[in-house]
Amino acid sequence: MQLAERIVHMLADGPRFTRQIAAELDVRGESVAAVCRCLRHKGWVCGEGGLHGLTRHGREELARGGFMPCRRKGRAAASAGRTLRQRAWAVMRMADHFSVESLLQTVSDGEERDAENNLTNYCRALYRAGFLGRTARTRAFFLRPEADSGPLAPAYNRAEKCVTDRNTGRTIFLEGNTHA
């Protein structure tokens, strides 16, 4: 059972704080918060100040045995062993534009450690290295066509402040790197 489904079943018994859900399910609070954001976006959960509860829509869907909105079909078979960043890169290559939040909803099941911070840092690094651009009005990211060199996700090395294109072997040193 996916984390989203476990949380919905738990909330059917009454509202709970993020920390209570995390403790009862033995998962990180950040994972619970990310899944609850997704569930809130889909209209299943409402929340304020870290307290989450099912909406009427959420209760109706749960009673009907409806689909779990934060569950991605076929992920276990399709992406076994693939990193969060590799899954995000695959989405970037297909999407016209995206945000960190939309990437999280697509590629994260809530089990990854600090997924939101990870993808935020990754997108910023790819932007600084010239792989990504931003739209003028909405500031959404998009993959620059000339930067799409293949299926392997660029590797971001935070310590060395560089991004390496694993398809071509080219390394781009980011501003502020003393090795450049």
Image (tube, helix red, strand yellow):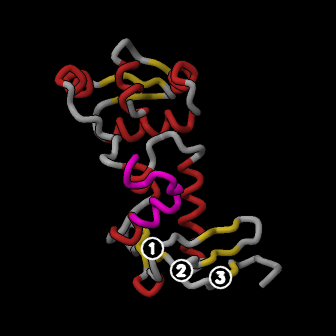
Image x and y of residue 129, in percent: 59, 78
Q: What residue sits right under mark 2 in the picture? A: 167
Q: Earlier in the sequence, mark 3 or mark 1?
A: 1
Q: Are marks 2 and 1 in contact (CB under 8 Å)?
A: yes
| Magenta run includes residue 77 | yes
Residue at image position (35%, 36%) is 39
Q: Nearer the viewer, mark 3 or mark 1?
A: 1
Amino acid tagged 1 = Pro
Residue 42 lies in what quarter of the image?
top left
Q: Nearer the viewer, mark 3 or mark 2?
A: 2
Which contiguous range is marked in magenta?
A: 76-90
Amino acid tagged 3 = Ile
Magenta portion: prevailing SS class: helix
Q: What residue sits right under mark 3 in the picture? A: 172
Spatial CA distance of label 2 from label 1 is 7 Å
Q: What residue sits right under mark 1 in the picture? A: 151
Q: Residues within 10 Å of mark 1 (few under 14, many from 20)?
A: few
Spatial CA distance of label 3 from label 1 is 18 Å
